[in-house]
């Protein structure tokens, strides 16, 4: 699923906050603005249990983060990175890094046809899921699409 439009992102965030009880001021705002607490910076303090590879560039137009201002344990985010390593190297990097930070790998799906791997990790004590896609682009770059969401 590709989240690329602001209205869709705002709707997903609103639904998640409604379901989790932190929707005090969350509503659709004029001009498709995102609710308070939503930004484009992947702050290492708020996401310290998710490691980022060195040498990768964040694609800000495709990334966002949201931490519920009323309940800080609720984190939603999409981080898209672009870099120059091998796909299998990034799969190993994330498997090792996330498992060392308390995440459990649930599944891995690889496709040689589209040169991609999708990994799913869970952290039951936080009630969170990471869906991580590692894809080789037509320009021979590696694109990492990391989606963090509540279970």
Image (cartoon, grey):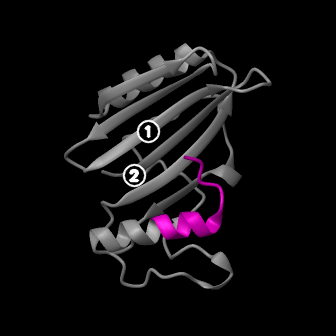
- The circle drawn on residue 53 is none
| Depicted 113 relative to depicted 48: above or below | above
Find out whether the residues at labels 1 and 2 contact each other: C-beta distance under 8 Å.
yes
Q: Judge by depth and name the residue closer to the eye, 70 or 28.
A: 28
At 59% across and 54% down in the image, what residue appears? 3
Is residue 3 magenta-colored?
yes
Q: Give the residues in magenta.
A: 1-12
Mark 2: give few (<14), some (14-19) or many (20+) Cα within 10 Å: some
Q: Quadrant of residue 5?
A: bottom right
Q: Position of residue 121 (x, y in %)?
A: 34, 34
Label 2, on which residue?
149
Residue 101, visible in the rendered structure: yes
Residue 99 picture location, percent across and down: 31, 27
| Image point (30%, 60%), residue name | 73
Q: Is residue 103 left or right of residue 111?
A: left
Q: Earlier in the sequence, mark 1 or mark 2?
A: 1
Choose between 136 and 45: the one closer to the eye. Answer: 136
Task: Decide: is 124 above or below 102.
Answer: below
Q: Is residue 112 above or below residue 57?
A: above
In the figure, 3 relative to 22: above or below?
above
Asked if one can make out residue 53 in the rendered structure from this viewpoint, the answer is: no
The verdict on residue 96 being magenta is: no
Residue 57 falls left or right of residue 24: right
Q: Residues within 10 Å of mark 1 (few under 14, many from 20)?
A: some
Which label sits on residue 131?
1
Distance Cα–Cα, label 1 vs label 2: 9 Å
Q: Position of residue 112 (x, y in %)?
A: 59, 14
> Element at badge 1?
strand
């Amino acid at each position: 699923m590709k989240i690329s439009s602001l209205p869709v992102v705002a709707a997903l965030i609103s639904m998640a906050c409604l379901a989790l009880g932190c929707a005090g001021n969350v509503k659709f705002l004029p001009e498709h603005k995102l609710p308070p607490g939503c930004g484009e910076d992947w702050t290492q303090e708020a996401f310290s249990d998710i490691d980022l590879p060195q040498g990768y560039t964040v694609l800000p137009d495709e990334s966002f983060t949201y931490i519920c201002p009323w309940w800080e344990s609720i984190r939603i985010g999409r981080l898209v990175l672009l870099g120059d390593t091998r796909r299998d190297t990034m799969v190993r990097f994330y498997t090792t890094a996330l498992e060392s930070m308390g995440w459990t790998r649930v599944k891995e799906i690889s496709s040689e046809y589209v040169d991609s791997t999708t990994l799913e990790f869970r952290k039951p004590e936080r009630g969170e899921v990471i869906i991580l896609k590692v894809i080789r682009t037509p320009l021979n770059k590696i694109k990492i699409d990391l989606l963090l969401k509540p279970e």
